[in-house]
Image (cartoon, rainbow, N blue to C red):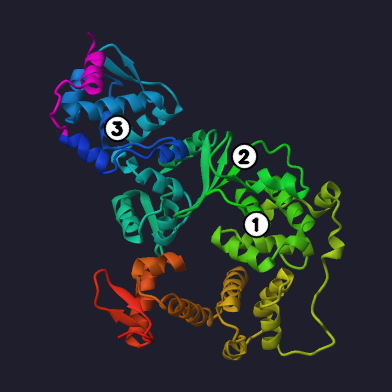
């Protein structure tokens, strides 16, 4: 019997019934092996045993199984599962009593990484996903959301990967001189794009691009036919999980998030113009912020009206080409929407535009803060006392206007704190833990704790002597 057959027999039939393989239990329970979903979506997910096996193959590219078991110092079952997975992924080929490294793009890149002294442990577990996300600058909070981990775990992984990361004002990105690593991660992304790809991921939600049937509800371009827009040449299918009936605003924002180039985004713009009477602009803005496309959404408004500069101009086809293709006349959307008959102060004009239901008015706020010296104390006093329903979109709009104009709006922080404190007070009509509050607010846990501590010190809420720690309002409590 060949060495591989012996190993397979030991694992699948059990050579020593009743004897527990402690290292295997630790690996399985400890999360060494990714879930089925994670494997399906991310293609390559390796554990510590995989990394050790790959390290052994980086030299000669061929090793006997007996020698491999001796060098790796892991249990038979761990090595068996590792070899089986690596073979399925195209990393290795089994040959009787030995294992050989396959010759392909990925293994050549791995050998190059190894020759540069790269430690494959940096690719294990969620680390490979973190590295894939850090081809662009991201904060620990964004990493936490992307990987569905705590902020403290994000910092832990960042510390472990410190040698390959740049740090700028608490934002992280793979060092530009780590070209081989970046090429390897891009190669993985390219391979994943032929299967299923997470375009966006939150704790309980996901936006998926796939080439085949997938669990969830169709969205993005896959639903455009229902709204009169033919996108027959886009063959990929787009799903939102969990499956439910989606609003047209959600379908639109999902398509903007899904857009990879100007051609795809042109269909999103056509969807918006064709269905504008159905759509709530405030809801679109809230969703655009949630999915990280608020800047692109404001660019769409600039593009349609022609009233201001489009920042991401590579994502837009020429306006004349759009008009010819989709039959929309941009002239009906242009022009200055200000009412010149009534002379308003700059501060009143800013407030009237920032709370307008017309997204085009928000673009005029961008011009105002660039051209005028506004009294932000006056503007803060002018903010309508209409509760959180109005305050939330107002803050969101101020943030995007500030970023696009490159001008600081100093009252945003105070308005945001007011909004969050009011929301917390509404939540604390019943006792809640920090975790429960954080899930409702959808902001980092450390930020929730800071706000709760401040409110507790100011006697706005009551900190309860419980385990776990809970908070409540004072009214009705002993």
What is the x, y in percent for residue 457? 32, 86
Q: Is residue 359 left or right of residue 257?
A: right
What is the x, y in percent for residue 162? 32, 52
In three-dimensional space, the C-alpha distance between marks 3 and 2, rounded to whole angstroms, equals 32 Å
| Quarter holding residue 167 | bottom left
Q: Label 3's element?
A: helix
Q: Nearer the viewer, residue 442 or 3?
A: 442
Label annotation for residue 50: 3
Q: Label 1's element?
A: loop
Find disc 2 in the rendering and name its residue. Answer: 237
Find disc 1 in the rendering and name its residue. Answer: 247
214, above or below 169, in the image: above
- Name the quadrant of the C terminus: bottom left
Can residue 311 be spotted in the picture? Answer: no
The magenta region covers 1-21
* Numbered marks: total: 3
Crowd around label 2: few <14 · some 14–19 · many ≥20 (10 Å): some
Can residue 433 be spotted in the picture? Answer: yes
Q: Earlier in the sequence, mark 3 or mark 1?
A: 3
């Amino acid at each position: 019997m060949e060495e591989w057959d012996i190993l397979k027999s030991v694992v699948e039939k059990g050579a020593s019934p009743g004897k527990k393989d402690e290292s295997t239990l630790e690996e399985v329970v400890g999360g060494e092996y990714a879930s089925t979903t994670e494997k399906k979506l991310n293609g390559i997910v390796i554990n510590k045993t995989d990394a050790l096996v790959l390290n052994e193959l980086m030299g000669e590219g061929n090793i006997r199984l007996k020698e491999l078991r001796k060098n790796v110092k892991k249990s038979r079952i761990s090595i068996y599962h590792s070899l089986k997975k690596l073979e399925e992924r195209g990393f290795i080929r089994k040959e009787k009593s030995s294992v050989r490294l396959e010759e392909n793009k990925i293994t050549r890149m791995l050998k190059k990484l190894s020759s540069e002294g790269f430690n494959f442990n940096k690719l294990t577990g969620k680390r490979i996903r973190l590295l894939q996300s850090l081809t662009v600058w991201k904060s620990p909070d964004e990493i936490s959301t992307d990987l569905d981990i705590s902020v403290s775990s994000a910092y832990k992984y960042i510390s472990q990967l410190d040698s390959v990361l740049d740090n700028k004002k608490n934002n992280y990105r793979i060092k530009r001189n780590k070209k081989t690593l970046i090429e390897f991660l891009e190669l993985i992304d390219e391979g994943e794009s032929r299967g299923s790809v997470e375009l966006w991921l939150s704790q309980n939600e996901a936006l998926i691009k796939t080439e085949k049937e997938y669990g969830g509800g169709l969205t993005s371009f896959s639903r455009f036919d229902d709204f009169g827009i033919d996108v027959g040449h886009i063959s990929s299918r787009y799903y939102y999980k969990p499956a439910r009936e989606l609003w047209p605003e959600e379908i639109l924002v999902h398509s903007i998030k899904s857009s990879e180039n100007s051609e795809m985004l042109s269909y999103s713009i056509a969807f918006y113009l064709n269905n504008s009477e159905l759509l709530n602009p405030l809801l679109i803005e809230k969703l655009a912020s949630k999915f990280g496309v608020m800047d692109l959404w404001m660019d769409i408004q600039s593009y349609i009206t022609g009233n201001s500069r489009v920042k991401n101009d590579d994502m837009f086809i020429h306006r004349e080409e759009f008009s010819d293709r989709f039959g929309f006349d941009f002239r009906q959307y242009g022009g200055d929407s200000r009412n010149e008959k009534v002379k308003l102060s700059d501060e009143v004009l800013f407030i009237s535009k920032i709370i307008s239901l017309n997204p085009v008015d928000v673009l005029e706020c961008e011009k105002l803060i660039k051209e005028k010296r506004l009294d932000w104390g006056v503007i803060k006093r002018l903010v309508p006392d209409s509760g959180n329903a109005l305050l939330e979109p107002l803050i969101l709009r101020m943030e995007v206007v500030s970023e696009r104009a490159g001008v600081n709006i100093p009252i945003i922080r105070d308005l945001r704190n007011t909004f969050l404190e009011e929301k917390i007070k509404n939540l604390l009509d019943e006792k809640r833990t920090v975790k429960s509050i954080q899930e409702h607010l959808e902001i980092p846990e450390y930020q929730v704790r800071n706000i709760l501590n401040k409110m507790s010190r100011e006697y706005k809420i009551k900190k309860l002597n419980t385990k776990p720690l809970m908070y409540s309002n004072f009214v009705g409590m002993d």
